[in-house]
Image (cartoon, rainbow, N blue to C red):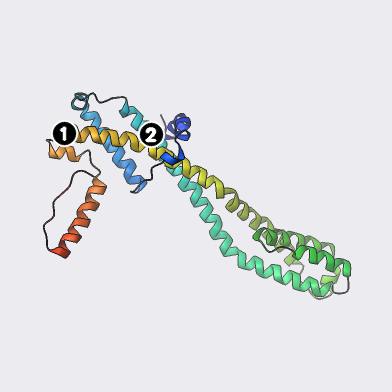
Amino acid sequence: MSDQQNLQDLLEEINAVPEEKIEYCDLPYNVFINEAEGLHTRASLDLPELKTYNFDETRLPKLLALIGALRTAQSNWETQKTDKQKAVEAWKAEAPAMNELHDELIANMEFAYRNDEQLLDKLADIKQGDSHADTVQDMASLAALGKENTALLTAINFDLTHLDTATEMADRMGHLLGEINGRMYFEDDLKLIRDKSYTLCKEVVDEIRNYGKFTFRKDTEKRKAYASKYKRERMISYRKAKAEKQNTPIEEDVNP
């Protein structure tokens, strides 16, 4: 079964996780997922010993399904986040040129239309508002106003191709703004699904780890396989750095 299908099959259970029960990952997601897959392999090999203490073997296929769901949920969130970041970066790169052309169009039109009160009133209406969305709309409106009144602009040697540029820029920047604003809330939804998927997956991982640590409590090497290698190595590094400062020996801990 595909990871995407796992997410779809478990989506109802994932969404049912109360927000106040959500747990947050304290290590990189790719590390957690890799360790969870390794844990599944280890527990599958040790299943006869684990079952000695009434380990529920249905937790193993459930863990695989949850890993697949989490991998997909994380990928969905990362992709959405990346797309939004690209839109934000593109906006930042192109906004200065848009703002410059915006101001130039207004300046030229105010001068060209200085003796036409009706056109000046239309220009004043366009200039209202100072949000990003207002600026994008201004570009389209200014282009339309200019194309309807080209004679006065031509009289001051205004380059009419700027009006086409303004129309194209309004379309492009409007699309970018839609990408940014449209993804603002979906990102939160996707993150919530990712966090809830992790919460369910961690619950099964923790239970298998606890069973393994207890089952092999007298076997240091096997017991170590049921602890997080990532956390263990981080703890060792921390203790090593601390010991070097204090000139004291360190002891390895297999419990993380």
Q: Is residue 254 left or right of residue 200?
A: left
Where is residue 98? Give x, y as percent. Answer: 65, 65
Residue displayed at 83% across by 64% down: 122
Name the kind of residue labelled 1 in the image: Phe
Q: Is residue 206 left or right of residue 162?
A: left
Task: Choose between 28 and 107: the one closer to the eye.
Answer: 28
Q: Check the image and report above or below for 67 versus 127.
A: above
Residue 24 has which mark?
none
Label 1 CA crowd tier, 10 Å (few <14, some 14–19, many 20+): some
Q: Earlier in the sequence, mark 1 or mark 2?
A: 2
Q: CA distance from mark 1 to mark 2?
A: 25 Å
Q: Mark 2 sits on what residue?
A: 66
Residue displayed at 57% across by 63% down: 92
Q: Mark 1 sits on what residue?
A: 216
Q: Is residue 216 left or right of residue 192?
A: left
Task: Choose between 26 and 65: the one closer to the eye.
Answer: 26
Q: Quadrant of residue 103?
A: bottom right
Instruction: Give the SS element for disc 2.
Output: helix
Q: Check the image and report above or below for 154 versus 190.
A: below
Q: Quadrant of residue 132?
A: bottom right
Q: Check the image and report above or below for 159 versus 219.
A: below
Name the kind of residue labelled 2 in the image: Leu
Instruction: Give the SS element for disc 1.
Output: loop
Placement of the C terminus among the 4 image quadrants: top left
Where is residue 211? Give x, y as percent. Answer: 23, 32
